[in-house]
Image (cartoon, rainbow, N blue to C red):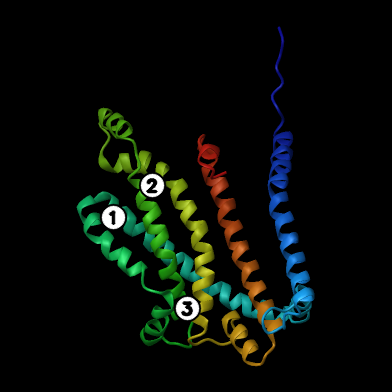
Amino acid sequence: MTVVAEPTPSGTVLATVRTRLVDWIPAIVVFCAGIAVWQLSIEIFNIQKFLLPKPGAIISAFWTQRGALWRAGWLTLKEALGGFALGSAAGILVATVLARFRRLGEALMPIAIAANAVPIIAFSPIFNAWFDPLSSKPRMATAGVLCFFPVMVNTLRGLTSVRPAQVELMRSYAGGELQIFRRVRIPTALPFVFSALKVATVLAMIGAIVADYFGSFGSLGITIKNSVALFDFETAWAAILMASILGVLMYVAVSLVERIVLQWDPTRQERGTA
């Protein structure tokens, strides 16, 4: 009798790590090529620093002022996280209600689309009037509005994408609406939800920084605004770099949670959510 040895978990983990590293190679190559083109373009065309500073000057400013940038980034990150949590939770809740009451969803969806078409910059002064402009609430609200719509739309799409055969099977076993929702609709919707949450992480950072321009102290948006006013463009770009790093970290954090939660899903790779 021949015994087939199962692959060890450590071997599986190493293979996964190698696969992920290989997947990142094209992105790293494109990033390095972009930096090289950036640097060469400045040298060849003599581009002034107020239009586009050199990458080396930006990195130098980032390192020199890393303490101040980190403090500003921490303030903006808290605002972005607060808006991300509020907007995502509200989006999931509203999508759940609309999935349960289809007629209500059909009536409210055009209104939601119209509201989503309003530029986010228009909300910031309104939220400053509603809340204390010196607190973080207006920035969180602005970030929350940006996160709300993609999460709501994607969650609703996931909840309503259940195959009729699955629902009929549950009903044949005397499953009620609550059981169908918990055992069929929610598992089906999870990949859609996580796709929206990853988009929302970036939108939350954008919303927080945009809202900073309308009233904030010591955050990344104010750092960018003040640096440009003082013609310190290297620091302004360094603050943009810090915002990008924080946005990527938020995205990666949600991706890790997605990987843990969706381990049970055998169709992850087919949908490209792995």
> Which label sits on residue 139?
3
**Whole-percent x and y of residue 157?**
36, 49
**Whole-percent x and y of residue 50?**
68, 84
Name the foreground residue: 231 vs 75: 231
SS type, badge 2: helix
Task: Give the number of marks.
Answer: 3
> Which label sits on residue 97?
1
In terms of image quadrants, where is residue 125? bottom left
* Residue that mark 2 sits on: 158
SS type, badge 1: helix
Quarter of the image with the C terminus in it: top right
SS type, badge 3: helix
Q: Badge 1, how many Cα within 10 Å: few under 14, some, many 20+?
A: few
**Whole-percent x and y of residue 270?**
52, 37
Mark with earlier residue (1, 3)? 1
- Please give the name of the residue rendered at 52% of the width and 34% of the height, measured from the top-left corner: 266
**Whole-percent x and y of residue 239?**
65, 78
Mark with earlier residue (1, 2)? 1
Name the foreground residue: 208 vs 113: 113
From the viewer's perspective, tell me whether residue 148 is left or right of residue 80. left
Could you give the CA–CA distance between mark 3 and mark 2, rounded to whole angstroms?
Answer: 29 Å
Could you give the CA–CA distance between mark 1 and mark 2, rounded to whole angstroms?
Answer: 13 Å
The answer to whether residue 31 is above or below residue 146 is above
